[in-house]
Image (spheres, coloured by chain):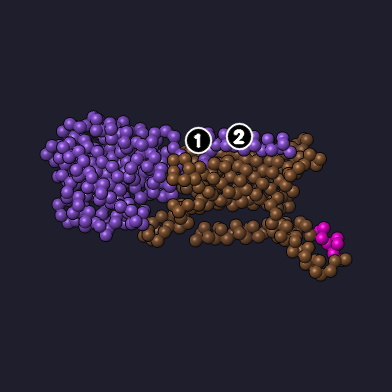
Chain colours: A brown, B purple
Amino acid sequence: MRLNRLFSSIVLLLLCVDVVAGDRMSDSTNVFAPSLSQYEKNVIRYQKHWAALIPSQFVIQNAGNMGVVSLGCGWDYGKHNQWETQVLLGYIPKHQSARGKLTMTVKENFLPWSIELKRGWSVQPLQASVYLNTVYGHEFWKTQPSRYPDSYYDFMSTKFRLNAAVGQRITYQIPAKARKMSKSVSFFYEISSCDLYIRSKIMDSSVSLTDILGLSIGVKFQTF
Amino acid sequence: MKSRFVRCLLAALTLAGLTACDDLFDTHPYDVDFGGETDINAKNIRKIERDFTDKDTLCIAFISDTHGWYKDAKDEVADINKRNDIDFVIHCGDLTDTGTKKEYEWSREILSDLKYPYVALIGNHDYLGTGNEAYEVMYGKVDFAFIAGRVKFVCLNTNATEYDYMAAVPNFDFMEEQMKKDSLNFDRTVIVMHAAPYSDQFNNNVAKSFRRYIDFFPNLMCCVYGHDHENTERRIYGDTLKFYGVDCAEHRNYRLMTITPDGYEIEQIVF
């Protein structure tokens, strides 16, 4: 049930993206406002809201308990675009199991600082993230199935994993003339762990920190 | 445009290449991808059957439910290694708490320090997610048996709830096969399982048939189980057959069984 609440807050968050991105565009529409009919204004507002759903960035990253590699798109918002919400699809190869598996992740990034360097480069010294990963397959359940006695595996879901990560990022602003699809490209790494591993560490202090942490690296293309 | 494509391709290839470095990158908790030792039960059974075929006295350490208590499990292994009288070790299941890849690896790392050969049964916790697939890679089949000192040890998967009672658990065909297989090489039988009859994991609809069926094993001595986190001695069916419960690692004790030609003794070792 707690997961349900988490999921609905993520949906709410996605709705906020729409609203915030909509605000950003409102200045430009006001300029034309006097000469527009009510109908035109409505259409512009309508288009503006739907346009906010166009992803502003694309991301590819490996590992991070989301699969061997994950691809996704995202939206940035906030006063300094310091917030990002990303949706990623990942793939876990078959390896020694019965088959490969797909995963989906909703990821929230917070980048409080950006330091400008020379020649279009900038550094984001902190990237803090939380993300919820779900893995598809009949062997995974959201909450314990009814075959189990009450509160048997109440502490967990095998389907949803809550992860936390911290990392850093370096961004290159592509010169306006050289731009094709992206205005900037960022390279990042992050160190992450998931709820089950953190739980293991809390249950038994002999589990070392390096045992529960994993590295992930990736590239982000900012379209606009 | 072309160079851009090449750059993207290079980035993707680098990512894929780096992912090959196993320990640094975590693919997923339920990724079944094990390096290191696999098929452990079969390897150790070969050692046990080679070294103890004709031994008339056997000493077996029974441990169980080490899930999540890695420090206690390490101490348990160290305590067993201190002794010189043990022939082999049987882990009665629940090697992991949530069946993840990392937990299986941590557990294997601890148990591999045992100086005696060991076999491990699958516990209900070991099923979570892709845990049962991980178990089969790392340890082998969920039902297995071996002979040492003319005693057959029949290790049965009894976690029926994990299959929603839809699988052959306990596997009567396997039992029937083992009653006859190599019958010239054993005279007595010990049955080991994770969850005992009438527990929340056993298929209790067949608990009574199970009791009747195991009587077909030649000279059934006793049953040993884990799951309950309790060091107990019970007559579950109210008859002469004894069931010995093996405690969890957190309670810091295990059982030692000494089998002689005349019978057996079982004691609790606290560490």
Give the number of the disc on residue B244.
Answer: none
Label 2 Cα crowd, 10 Å radius (few <14 / some 14-19 / many 20+)? some
- Can see residue A14? yes
Q: Is residue A79 magenta?
A: no
- Can see residue B228? no
**Which residue bears the numbered disc 1?**
B23
Give the number of the disc on residue B14.
Answer: 2
SS at mark 1 in the image: loop
Q: Quadrant of residue B4?
A: top right
SS at mark 2 in the image: helix
Task: Give the residue type that dot 2 points to.
Answer: Thr
Which tag, 2 or 1, sits closer to the chain's start? 2
Determine whether A101 is above or below B23 in the image. Answer: below
Q: Quadrant of residue B221?
A: top left
Q: Is residue A31 magenta?
A: yes
Q: Residue furthest right?
A: A35
Label 1 Cα crowd, 10 Å radius (few <14 / some 14-19 / many 20+)? some
Residue A79 horizontal/vertical position (percent):
73, 52
Q: Chain of mark 1?
A: B
Instruction: Name the dominant secondary structure of the magenta segment.
Output: helix
Q: CA distance from mark 2 to mark 1?
A: 17 Å
Which residue is pictured at 21% across the width and 32% down the height? B52
Q: Residue furthest front?
A: B2
Residue B207 horizontal/vertical position (percent):
24, 56
Q: Magenta stretch? A: A27-33
Task: Give the residue type that dot 1 points to.
Answer: Asp
Residue B28 horizontal/vertical position (percent):
50, 44
Which residue is pictured at 25% across the width and 57% down the height? B206
